[in-house]
Amino acid sequence: MDVKAAPNGVATIEDRILRITGYYGYYPGYSGQKSASRSSVIRCKPGANCPSTQTGLRRQHSPLSAAEESAAPILELQSRSPSGFCRHGRGERKDRSGEEGTQTQAENSSQDSHPQTRCESCTSTFLKILWGFLIILSVSSSCIGTTQIVKITYKNFDYPFFMTWFSTNWNIMFFPVYYSGHLATAQEKQSPIKKFRECSRIFGEDGLTLKLFLKRTAPFSILWTLTNYLYLLALKKLTATDVSALFCCNKAFVFLLSWIVLKDRFMGVRIVAAIMAITGIVMMAYADGFHGDSIIGVAYAVGSASTSALYKVLFKMFLGTANFGEAAHFISTLGFFNLIFLSITPIILYFTKVEYWSPFSAVPWGFLCGIAGLWLAFNILVNVGVVLTYPILISIGTVLSVPGNAAVDLLKREVIFSVVRLGATIFICLGFLLMLLPEEWDEITLRFINNLKEKKSEEHAEDVTDSNVHFRSRSRANGTVSIPLA
């Protein structure tokens, strides 16, 4: 049945339906162009040639808007597909699919890189903590071993300055140990002379000269010797536990000197720590009464802590910070200065009968080598620990030597802990730990408390939401409807 053309130009039933339904984009003759576009896909027999672009489709002009015209796909005749159909726009789809595939691969690779980065950071943090645990044990063990061997050596060889001089000479081996580690781990190995010159920049741009050797090394070498000598003198008067606890006061003295000399930031918590350390010193002196060897031993230990603090503050003032190689170079230089210029002192003490021993074979070289080796190991571990782990862990290892020495003294039955002595030790150790707090400790604490409050409020809100959902589900199951209040 043929349909005649209507006066409005609608010739087919399809055009009438589209006009009545208000199809978007309808115009008269729509069905005719649609049938023409359908004919653009031409059935090709296998083996026959598809029409070329010259004999291809000619698009009919239609009253499309400019936007719709620009959005219309560009039709191109392509080569025949294996199934025998000539398809249009296939190359464009390939280009788009290729671009989408490239973007997808980039997104996937970026997503894969994030877990790898997190794994690497977690691994590095775990290794730092593991190294820190080992450094803590090593530092505390070297401190305990040095103190206890000195106490044993005093039974047969009571000459503290010779022990100090002999142990300080072993510092010469610090730089060779560092260079051996450099050869074992570095990819680009340097000669000893080149590495020595590189590490000597701690003394200035010109390196180590004779003038700088005498000017910079002399005061630090004297402070180093005084620190160790006073420490050994204190061990003659007090127990190992008391001396190691009193020496922990050097952190408080470092803060006070840095605040006065270097104009460092004032921190109230560190003032409290310094007061606690001074209180512990007074209580330690009072433990056995303000008389006899006890007060002298406390004075020696406090003097050792003070010279150690002065050494650290002056080092920061004149030399600044130093890396591992520069620290190894500097400590080895101190050993050379001690060997060259301070060797006259034990000789004078020997001939003046102040530190005289006879015969020469009576010197316990095994114990002296043990003390020197552990002291050198302690200095190496402190500087290596800064590179491998967190510096705060090294300080924790130092303060752990106090309970370690206490345990050894109890086993040897050389100390009886009174209430005053125990309180003094606790005060000093707490003051030492307060000194380890960072400068922004108050801001960090407030941020941590706020995060905890936010987490609790979020959890409470989630619990309330879950309870409301559970209540509504039960109400619906019972056939009731709960109306929430605004």
Image (cartoon, helix red, strand yellow):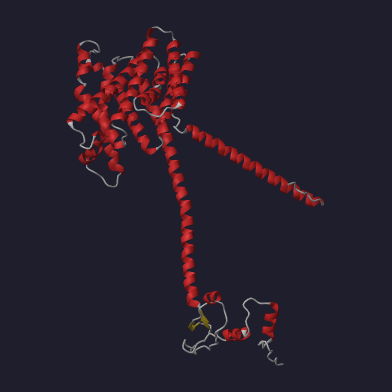
At a point 28% along the width and 15% down the height, the residue shown is 159
Could you tell me how many numbered marks the image carries? 0
Report which quarter residue 11 is drawn in: bottom right
Q: Looking at the picture, how far across and down is residue 283, in whole percent?
A: 45, 14
Residue closer to the observer: 448 or 116? 448
**Residue 418 shows up from this direction:** no
Residue closer to the observer: 24 or 302? 24
- Quarter of the image for the N terminus: give it: bottom right
The answer to whether residue 260 is left or right of residue 362 is right
Report which quarter residue 237 is drawn in: top left
Q: Looking at the picture, how far across and down is residue 411, in whole percent?
A: 45, 19
**Residue 246 shows up from this direction:** yes
At a point 38% along the width and 38% down the height, the residue shown is 388
Q: Looking at the picture, how far across and down is residue 2, in whole percent?
A: 70, 93
At a point 42% along the width and 16% down the height, the residue shown is 281
Q: Looking at the picture, how far across and down is residue 234, in whole percent?
A: 35, 15
Report which quarter residue 342 is drawn in: top left
At a point 62% along the width and 43% down the height, the residue shown is 458
